[in-house]
Amino acid sequence: MRFPGRRKHRHYFPIDKKDPLTHKLTNTVQLEHPYVVGLDQTIVDIEANVCSSVLEQFNLKKGLSQLVDSATAESLYNYLVEHDLINVQYAGGTIGNTMHNYSVLADDRSVLYGVMSQNISVGNYAYQYLCNTSSKVDLQHLQPVDGPIGRGFTLITEEGERTFAIDSGMMNRLSPDFINEDMIKNASAFVLSAYFTRCSGEDTLDKASLKAIEYANKHGVPVVLTLGTRFMIDERPQWWREFIQEHVQILAMNEEEADALVGTKDPLIAADKALELVDMVLCTAGPEGLYMAGYTDEKFKRKSEREYLPGSIPEFNKYEFSRPLRKAECEEPIKIYSHIAPYLGGPETIKNTNGAGDGALAALLHDISSNDFHKLNVKGSSKHLLPALTYSSLSQICKYANRVSFEVLTQNSPRLSKGLPEREDSLEHAYWEK
C-alpha cells in the first residue's frame, strides 16, 4: 500500500515489511491489506478510421450515437479486424477505470465484479480488456458468460466526423447469485455507478447491484456511487434522491449531474445540498476545479491554515483541515468543505476528458483504504481516536484527487499507465505543502 498523496508525515505509515525501528526487512512484520470492491458493466472501447461507405454498409447514421445488436457488432468488429482499420482497443467502464486507477495508485488489490466472455481469442476485445487492466485488480470474480462483453465503437470518417455504435452484449447479465457476502463485508468500500439501473429484458445487473448494496449496508461498508451522466438522473431525480439517502454514504458527481440531482449549477451549493443525502461528496467542476464536502464532529474540527475562501457559503473552507466522519458518528455534526483549482491551471493540452472524475474518485478510495490499512497495521495509533472515514483531511484529499485528475487529462486513455511521479518535474513541490 502506497501512501496516499504526499506530505510531511506525522504518523508512521508502513509501506513495506521493514521493522520501523531498525529499517531492516523482517519476516515478523506481516502487513494486513484492505481492498475495495467495484461492480461494473465490462465494456471495451474500439476506435477505428473508416470510409463513409462502411457506415452505410452497417446502416449507421454518421455523427450520431446509436445502439446496435450483437450480431451487427460482431460483423462490424470482424470487418474492422480483417481490413486492419482499428487504431486502438482499450478497457472502459466507469468503475473498471476507477478500480484500475485505484490499484495503480495504491499498488494494492481491488476486486471487480462484472462479466467476461468465457471464450477469448488472443487479440480480441475481451483479451484487450484483460490486458489493459492492472494486474493488481482481482478479476477472479468476473462471471463467465457465453457471449460478448460490451463494445463501444468510435468510427472516424475521412472528414474527422465521429460516429458511435454501442452494443451492450452480455455486460448486464451479472447474476445476483455471483455476489459473495464475505467479499463485500470485508471491503473498505463498495463502488458502483448509476448505470446499473439501465437494464431490460433478461438483464440481471440491477438485481446483482442491489444485492451487493444490501450486503454493504448490512455490514457498515461505505457505498460509493458515481452518477455517470445527468440524463439518467434527469429521468427520475426524486427516485435517485430517495435511493441515495437510503443506501449511499459517499457520492461522486460533476457539476452537470449535481444540477440534475439537487437543482443547482453552483457546485458548492450542490455539494452542500447533497450532504443532506450522504456523508461525503466529491464534485468535479471542470475548469473551476474540484469541491469536496463532508461532516466532522465539533470537538474534532481543525481550522485551515490557508486563506479562507469567499463563495456562496462564506469562508466555506474554514475547517477543511478536518478529517470527514459519518454524520451518525458525530455527537455535534458540522459541515466541512474544501476546494482546489486545477493543478498547474490545468494541462497545456487536454488529450482526454473521459476519466478525470474516475481518477479523482480513485484517489479518494485510496485514502479511504489507507485509513483501514493504517488502522490494521499500526495498532493503538492516536490517528484512530476518531472514527474518520479517511486517512487524510478534506484538504489533502482534494490535492491528491486534483493531481490524479491532471495526470488522466494529459494522456489518451482514462486509465493511468503509472502512478504519480515520486518527484514533480516543476517547482510544484510546494503544491503538497500548501
Image: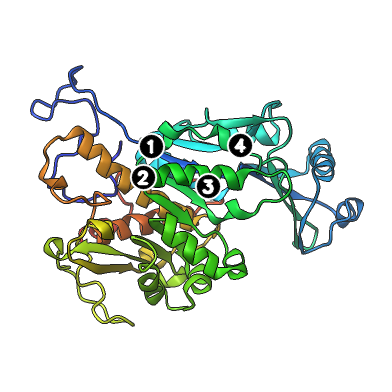
Q: Nearer the viewer, residue 308 or 376?
A: 376
Binning the other alpha carbons within 10 Å of mark 4 as few (below 14), some (14 to 19) or many (20 upward) gives: some
- Looking at marks 1 and 4 on the same chain, the residue that comes earlier in the sequence is marked by 4
Task: Quadrant for the N terminus, please.
Answer: top left
The numbered mark, 4 or 3, whose residue comes first in the sequence reads 4
Local SS, label 2? loop
Q: Is residue 55 left or right of residue 248?
A: right
In the rendered image, which residue does mark 3 sit on?
210
Q: Quote the CA–CA distance across marks 2 and 4.
A: 21 Å
Label 1 packing within 10 angstroms: few (<14), some (14-19), many (20+): some
The answer for how far apart the CA atoms under marks 1 and 4 are is 18 Å
Q: Give amino acid for label 2.
A: Val
Q: Nearer the viewer, residue 138 or 350?
A: 138
For label 2, the crowd category at 10 Å Cα-Cα, with few meaning under 14, some 14 to 19 and many 20 or more, is: many
Q: CA distance from mark 2 to mark 3?
A: 14 Å
Q: Determine the residue positioned at 49% across, 77% down.
A: 263
Judge left or right: residue 338 versus residue 55: left
Q: Disc 1 marks which amino acid?
A: Lys
Q: Determine contact: label 4, label 3, CB under 8 Å.
A: no
